[in-house]
Amino acid sequence: MEELKIYIEYMTLKELKEIRAIIDRYIAKKERQLKLIKSI
């Protein structure tokens, strides 16, 4: 995680926003998976 924080420091705003969009999709996917597991 520490390396990631250093890397993020040097990214542009545009790159950070693109990454945020990707991460949001992964978070939504993981949350759906967890809900499916809990509903069984």
Image: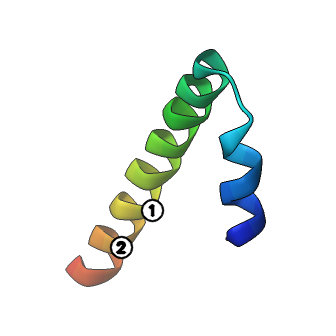
Query: Label 2: few (<14), some or many (≥20) within 10 Å?
Result: few
Amino acid type, residue under disc 2 in the picture: Leu
Residue positioned 61% across, 16% down in the render: 14
Q: Tell which of 30 and 40 is nearer to you.
A: 30
Q: Tell which of 32 and 27 is nearer to you.
A: 27
Residue 23: horizontal and vertical position, in percent?
A: 53, 45
Residue 1 versus residue 29 in the image, above or below:
below
Q: What is the distance, in whole Å, between disc 1 and disc 2 at their CAs?
A: 6 Å
- SS at badge 2: helix
Q: Tell which of 36 and 17 is nearer to you.
A: 17
Residue farthest left in this picture: 39
Left or right: 15 with respect to 21?
A: right
The residue singled out by tag 1 in the image is 30
Amino acid type, residue under disc 1 in the picture: Lys
Residue 6: horizontal and vertical position, in percent?
A: 73, 55
Residue positioned 74% across, 36% down in the render: 10
